[in-house]
Image (cartoon, coloured by chain):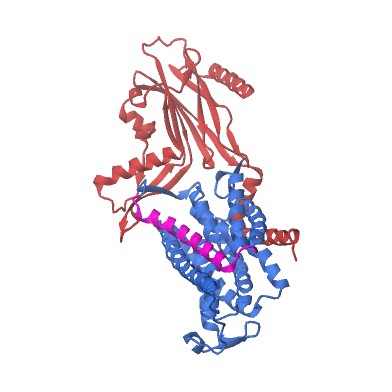
């Protein structure tokens, strides 16, 4: 980890040297660009750090820098359902379909998201859970007045699962311009291609933003098993049956009584 | 120790799963049942997605019935012809089951159908077994002779066409009820993740009048192959068979079953049936409560497309 941080820091400085002269530039780096899921995977955390690079010509502005770092997972379609009583039994009744919502969304920031910038800016860049664009599919039997309930329930359940999170005051400034933050990735994190987005604000103005890739992958046996079950599903089924019969047979032989 | 499941895509406590397999294996050895109807709910209650639980338990049932079938084969206590006929129906039912399973899953009604079916079947079978075992215990205490099987006794089932002779079972009956019975249990087994032995055994005894000595072996034979087919169908259709989960359950299960079988030999048959009836009713009741009381959370979410769907 220390080595990774050091490399990333060097990278930041190297990048800083090569930047063309703009007022403020944000550079950020992720501790590791690939998260590997193995059989003992119980979640991990990634460290993101970077630097605000000021052009020497920049006149020192008033106000402090505010930062938001977003880690966003691959898109998913998700159906949120609500139970209702039907013939005395609780069953799923109404539903709302969310299209292309992130499978994972974690944001950390220096201050409360709402204090960083205008709603319009936050909405545009989808910074903060309240500013996520959760598009619902056109056809829905849910009355307009109740749609917000589904949205709220969706966000609440995803937060319970640890897949959506918002933490304030979790970005730490090491010096006046260098920052660092950690984002925990839970054990149930979906695999896929992620984006790490960093935003630099000052006095409600978005000064700079940067984006980098993060890959979450199963590796080794886990990846092999998953691919096998998808690509050769018939053979996978046969293997499962063989394995089960063999285990049963073996137990019969070991514990043979008569 | 945490173990990451490659298909369910969640980590589980290996010892918890192993223990569940062992406990259910113990009961299955004790009562001579597959135990799927206990294992599937246990897995669902412990946070395994229902689709993965159902599909994976079919694999576990293959393992637990395989060793038992071997024992019964050695004792020649299986009617292979009857078993094969049940199996033909079973495979057809199982294929239909996977189709319905897929459909219900996309409609978001899988969980409620599983729960309702559990309540219905466990409630009915549990009550029947409870009444029957209480009567048996009373009869034993009052010393009334048990009615023997009367070979000449017929019911409406014996009037159906397409008759076939089953030598080992000393039966001459139509194949229609046999195919229907096999299909029905294969269908339920695939949708509910159970072997269905607890339904098959009474049906063979009371409807077809198969001799008791042959029933369990034949039922297990049919379960072994129907569940093998169900595993393959689930692997292709729902793609939710988790090999790592299945293997952990199997190893716990086969070990537990050996101990259960030993304890079972020291208990009387009617006492065993009474205990099993109470167990079946208990699981059914647990599902009924979940359906009837106001849920803690009215909302639920399910991934329909993209990562983890």
Task: Inspect this view and state whether residue B195 appears.
Answer: no
Q: Looking at the picture, tell me which residue is in the foreground, B220 or A3.
A: B220
**Vertical order, B40 against A172 (above or below):** below
Q: Is A154 positioned to the left or the right of B259 in the image? A: left
Side of A130 where B158 appears, left or right: right
Picture coordinates of residue B18, whole percent (x, y):
62, 49
Stretch of the chain drawn in magenta = B265-294
- Does the rendering let one see residue A48? yes
Type of secondary structure dominating the magenta stretch: helix
- Shade of chain B as shown in the rendered figure: blue
Q: Quadrant of the N terminus of chain B?
A: top right
Q: Residue furthest front?
A: B142
Total number of numbered discs in the rendering? 0
Residue shown at the point (60%, 38%) measured from the top left: A41
Which residue is nearer to you in this view: B295 or B236?
Answer: B295
Work out whether residue A164 or residue A4 is closer to the camera in this orientation and state it: A164
Q: Position of residue B197 (x, y in %)?
A: 56, 68
Which quadrant holds residue B4? top right
The answer to if A252 sits in the magenta stretch is no
Q: Looking at the picture, how far across and down is residue A74, in whole percent? A: 48, 41
Q: Is residue A217 left or right of residue A104?
A: right
Whether B238 is drawn above or below A223: the answer is below
Magenta segment includes B290: yes
Q: Quadrant of residue B116?
A: bottom left
Give the quadrant of residue B103: bottom left
> Along the line of sight, which residue is nearer the eye, B253 or B188?
B253
Chain whose colour in the figure is red? A
Q: Position of residue B14 (x, y in %)?
A: 61, 45
């Amino acid at each position: 980890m220390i080595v990774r941080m050091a490399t990333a820091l060097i990278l930041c400085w190297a990048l800083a040297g090569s930047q063309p002269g703009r007022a403020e530039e944000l550079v950020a780096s992720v501790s590791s660009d690939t998260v590997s899921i193995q059989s003992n995977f119980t979640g991990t955390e990634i460290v993101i750090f970077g630097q605000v690079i000021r052009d020497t010509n920049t006149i020192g502005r008033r106000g402090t820098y505010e930062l938001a770092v977003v880690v966003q997972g691959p898109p998913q379609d998700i159906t949120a359902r609500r139970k209702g009583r039907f013939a005395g039994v609780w069953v799923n009744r109404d539903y709302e379909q969310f299209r292309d919502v992130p499978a994972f969304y974690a944001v950390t920031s220096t201050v409360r998201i709402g204090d960083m910038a205008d709603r319009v800016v936050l909405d545009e860049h989808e910074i903060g859970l309240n500013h996520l664009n959760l598009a619902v599919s056109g056809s829905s039997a849910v009355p307009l007045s109740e749609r917000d309930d589904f949205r709220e329930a969706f966000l609440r359940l995803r937060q319970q699962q640890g897949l959506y999170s918002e933490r304030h005051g979790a970005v730490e400034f090491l010096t006046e311009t260098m920052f660092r933050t950690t984002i925990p990735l839970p054990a149930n994190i979906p695999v896929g291609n992620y984006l790490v987005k960093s935003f630099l604000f000052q006095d409600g103005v978005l000064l700079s933003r940067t984006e980098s890739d993060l890959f979450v992958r199963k590796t080794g046996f886990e990846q092999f098993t998953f691919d096998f079950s998808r690509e050769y599903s018939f053979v996978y089924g046969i293997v499962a049956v063989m394995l089960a019969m063999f285990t049963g047979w073996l137990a019969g032989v070991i514990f043979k009584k008569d | 120790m945490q173990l990451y499941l490659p298909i369910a895509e969640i980590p589980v406590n290996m010892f918890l799963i192993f223990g569940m397999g062992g406990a259910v294996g113990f009961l299955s050895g004790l009562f001579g049942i597959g135990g799927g109807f206990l294992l599937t709910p246990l897995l669902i209650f412990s946070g395994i997605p229902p689709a993965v639980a159902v599909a994976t338990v079919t694999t576990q049932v293959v393992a637990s019935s395989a060793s038992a079938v071997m024992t019964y084969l050695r004792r020649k206590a299986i009617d292979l012809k009857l078993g094969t006929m049940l199996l033909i129906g079973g495979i057809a039912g199982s294929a239909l089951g996977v189709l319905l399973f897929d459909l219900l899953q996309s409609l978001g009604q899988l969980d409620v159908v599983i729960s309702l079916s559990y309540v219905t079947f466990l409630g009915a079978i549990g009550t029947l077994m409870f009444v029957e075992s209480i009567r048996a215990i009373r009869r034993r205490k009052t010393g009334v002779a048990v009615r023997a099987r009367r070979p000449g006794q017929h019911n409406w089932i014996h009037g159906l066409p397409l008759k076939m002779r089953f030598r080992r079972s000393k039966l001459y009956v139509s194949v229609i009820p046999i195919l229907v019975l096999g299909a029905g249990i294969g269908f339920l087994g695939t949708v509910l993740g159970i072997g269905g032995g607890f339904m098959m055994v009474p049906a063979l005894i009371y409807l077809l009048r198969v001799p008791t000595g042959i029933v369990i072996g034949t039922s297990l034979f049919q379960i072994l192959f129907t569940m093998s087919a169900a595993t393959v169908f689930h692997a292709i259709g729902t793609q939710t068979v988790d090999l790592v989960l299945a293997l952990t359950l199997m190893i716990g299960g086969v070990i537990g079953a050996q101990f259960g079988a030993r304890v079972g030999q020291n208990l009387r048959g009617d006492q065993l049936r009474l205990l099993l009836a109470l167990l079946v009713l208990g699981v059914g009741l647990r599902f009924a409560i979940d359906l009837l009381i106001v849920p803690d959370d009215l909302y639920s979410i399910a991934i329909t497309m993209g990562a983890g769907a």
